[in-house]
Amino acid sequence: MAMDGTRRADIKPGSEVMVELSEHKRSGRLTGGRVKEILTSSPNHPHGIKVMLETGQVGRIKQIR
């Protein structure tokens, strides 16, 4: 069951996610990876929780795998 990544409680460091990187906002291209750090402090965000992946890339979660 895939979740959409708008709730901070659903995300933990090490979670496998698909994020939309800032530079891919126009195209909607998704990048897969593991969460290193959760950057959004609010409990939810309508466009997706912002995270840093283990690769150092930053983006908003669009899907939790």
Image (cartoon, rainbow, N blue to C red):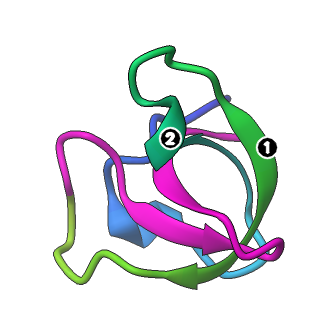
* 44 in relation to 39, above or below: above
Q: Residue at x 50, y 18 (%)?
A: 28
- Could you classify mark 1 by the number of other residues whose Cα lies within 10 Å: few (under 14), some (14-19), or many (20 or more)? some
Q: Residue at x 50, y 40 (%)?
A: 23
In the image, residue 54 lies in the stretch drawn in magenta:
yes
- The quarter holding residue 56 reads bottom right
Judged left or right of residue 36, residue 34 is: right
- Please tell me which of labels 1 and 2 falls first in the chain: 2
Magenta-colored span = 45-65
**Is residue 1 something that shows in the picture?**
yes
Judged left or right of residue 28, residue 48 is: left
- Could you classify mark 2 by the number of other residues whose Cα lies within 10 Å: few (under 14), some (14-19), or many (20 or more)? few
| Quarter occupied by the N terminus | top right
**Is residue 61 something that shows in the picture?**
no
* 31 in relation to 41, above or below: above
Tell me which amino acid carries mark 1: Gly
In the image, residue 18 lies in the stretch drawn in magenta:
no
Residue 19 on image: x %, y %:
59, 44
Front residue of 22/41: it is 22
Foreground mark, 1 or 2, reads 2
Q: Residue at x 20, y 71 (%)?
A: 43
Residue 22 on image: x %, y %:
44, 47
Q: Residue furthest top?
A: 27
Residue hosting label 2: 23
Q: CA distance from mark 1 to mark 2?
A: 15 Å
Residue hosting label 1: 32
The image shows a total of numbered marks equal to: 2
- The quarter holding residue 26 reads top left
